[in-house]
Image (tube, rainbow, N blue to C red):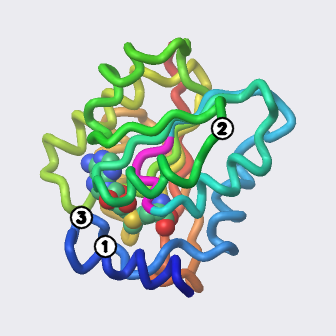
Amino acid sequence: MGKKLDFFKTFVKDRDVASVIPTSPRCVKKVCLNIDFSKDFTLVEYGPGNGVFTEHLIENMTEGSRLILIEANKDFADQLKAAINDPRVTIHNALAGDVESILDQEDVGNIDYVLSGIPFSFLKNDRKIIVLNATKKILKKDGLFLAYQTSGHLKKPVMEVFGNFETDFEPLNIPPYFIYKVYNKAS
Ligand SMILES: C[S@@+](CC[C@H](N)C(=O)[O-])C[C@H]1O[C@@H](n2cnc3c(N)ncnc32)[C@H](O)[C@@H]1O
């Protein structure tokens, strides 16, 4: 309950948090079914919040995997830095749109997965395209962009940048989420 309350308090101060409580464990598992935890991977997470997906990733990823967290809210970024002491994980208090310059500081090649919880619906269309283009650039060929969102609004910009998507729906989460699965088909 403490974590949910802290999340709500952060939402009250910063509406870009976009949700009143963290994503449910059921929805976390559903989104993460798209990740192959048997192999080493590098994953960038946009908008980890207080870390519900992050915890699941850390618990399940191999010793050789890397996780790079990009969180805009300073309180959340500080909470994550205090809670996580794992050499596989780095935490940046920054915007998803700055992912390319962030990765310049990291010793990683192209990325296997980008997992995103940021509220794309709050961004103007040109900003959505900037974030999606940066995401496409950092992903490996056949790398996967996974995003959970409150509506179908991401279909058009995702088609414009990636040319493909599949969606699933998780009605029981608060809020209900569309889950986007998008491949980086070009090299
Ligand atoms: C809907 S919450 C999801 C939090 C968490 N991943 C979860 O599933 O419970 C959205 C998160 O994205 C962060 N965020 C919003 N805009 C962002 C941006 N442009 N770059 C990085 N993080 C952002 C918010 O601070 C918040 O932590």
Q: Secondary structure at mark 2?
A: loop
**Residue drawn at 80 percent across, 30 percent down:** 63
Q: Is residue 156 something that shows in the picture? A: no
Q: Nearer the viewer, mark 1 or mark 3?
A: 1
Q: Is residue 31 something that shows in the picture? A: yes
- Tell me the kind of residue under disc 2: Asp
Disc 1 within 8 angstroms of ligand 1 (CB): yes
Asked if residue 17 is positioned above or below residue 118 in the image, the reply reads: below
Q: What range is drawn magenta here?
A: 45-49
Residue 3 is situated, as x and y percent measured from the top left of the image, at 52, 77
Q: Hey, which quadrant is residue 159 in on the image?
A: top left
Q: Earlier in the sequence, mark 2 or mark 3?
A: 3
Q: Marks 1 and 2, Cα distance to the nearest angstrom?
A: 25 Å
Write down which quadrant ligand 1 falls in: bottom left
Q: Marks 1 and 3, Cα distance to the nearest angstrom?
A: 10 Å
Neighbours of disc 3 within 10 Å: few (<14), some (14-19), many (20+): some
- Tell me the kind of residue under disc 1: Thr
**Front one among 70 and 187:** 70
Residue 1 is situated, as x and y percent measured from the top left of the image, at 56, 87
Asked if residue 1 is positioned above or below residue 78 in the image, the reply reads: below
Q: Nearer the viewer, mark 1 or mark 2?
A: 2
Residue 104 is situated, as x and y percent measured from the top left of the image, at 38, 14
**Which numbered disc covers residue 174?**
none
Residue at numbered disc 1: 10
Q: Earlier in the sequence, mark 1 or mark 2?
A: 1
- Tell me the kind of residue under disc 3: Asp
Q: Hey, which quadrant is residue 85 in on the image?
A: top right
164 with respect to 28 (left or right): left
Residue at numbered disc 3: 16
